[in-house]
Amino acid sequence: MSEIKTIVLPIGREQPDVENGSIFFVGTATVILRYAGFTILTDPNFLHQGDHVHLGYGIRATRTTNPAIEIEELPPIDLLVLSHMHEDHFDRVAEEKLDKRIPIVSTQHAIAKLNKKGFNSTYALETWEKITFTKGEEKLCISAMPGTHGPAFLSAALPPVMGSMLEFQTPAGKTRFRLYITGDTLITEQLKEIPKRYSDIDLGLLHLGGTMVFGVLLTMDAKQGVEAIQIIAPQTAIPIHYNDYTVFKSPLEDFMKAVSAAGLEERVKYLSHGDTYTFKVSAT
């Protein structure tokens, strides 16, 4: 695993809280993560119910929900983590209204698209590569995890996808808290490498929904979501990216039933749009 570089972020006025963190669920794959002085936005999607997104090759999807907040209500964001370049993950609202100087970590494909849109603080990662952000004495290492957004025969029609491993570290480099975001991936053999490299994952955000296009599964459905928990083994898992678009064919209720059948209820927390999950981190 190679490290690209270290990016120094401006220090805030408040003392970073390393004992408490939170995940605010905006909708789709969009969350606001706050921990250790960092505020991180994922996959910004602020379109409204009834709005359409274009997924390429003439395929459109309609949003069936509203975001919990408007993009103008976002707190100051330190950086953005993006799974891939699809309009339900980086929409025209984000393109128009986000600060073009916001640091963005994503795939080579997404970064090339973002650069053409005027975003100029971008960092592309290949699988297993990492980048470090510092904010005062606090460190955040982001590593690109493997992701596959569909079967091989559709690879030319789909953008490359990455999952993300976020490791919040002490000044000495010891990991305080580890968060895994699946990205829009299916279950593949590559995912089995993740727990071999990262044995202790505190929290996992699962992109579900069972996206179907022309009868082909493009994101994890209920069954694969449970399998992801069993493979990755996070202490806690939170499903996101569900029930938001017409192409999402596996509702959250199916996942809840599958979780119950697998005896994993104690490992999963459910958020509705606008809910906040708070977590505590043991002192190190």
Image: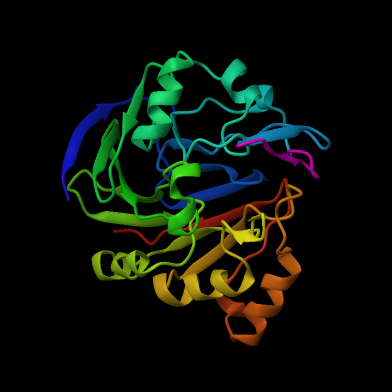
Kindly indicate the quadrant of the structure image that contains residue 52: top right
Q: Is residue 140 above or below residue 154?
A: above
Residue 13 position in % (x across, y down):
42, 24
Q: Out of 193 and 259, give the one closest to the viewer.
A: 193
Outermost residue to the front: 153
Residue 257 position in % (x across, y down):
71, 78
Residue drawn at (36%, 25%), measured in percent from left and top?
122
Residue 115 position in % (x across, y down):
40, 19
Q: Is residue 95 above or below residue 80?
A: above
Q: Out of 239 and 83, give the one closest to the viewer.
A: 83
Residue 221 part of the magenta segment? no
Q: Image check: 61 left or right of 236?
A: right
Residue drawn at (67%, 63%), measured in percent from left and top?
270
Q: Is residue 17 visible?
A: yes
Magenta residues, start to end:
57-67
The C terminus lies in which quarter of the figure? bottom left
Outermost residue to the right: 50
Kindly indicate the quadrant of the structure image that contains residue 53: top right
State the count of labels: 0
Q: Image check: 30 left or right of 196?
A: right
Q: Is residue 158 visible?
A: no
Colour option used: rainbow
Q: Is residue 2 above or below residue 266?
A: above
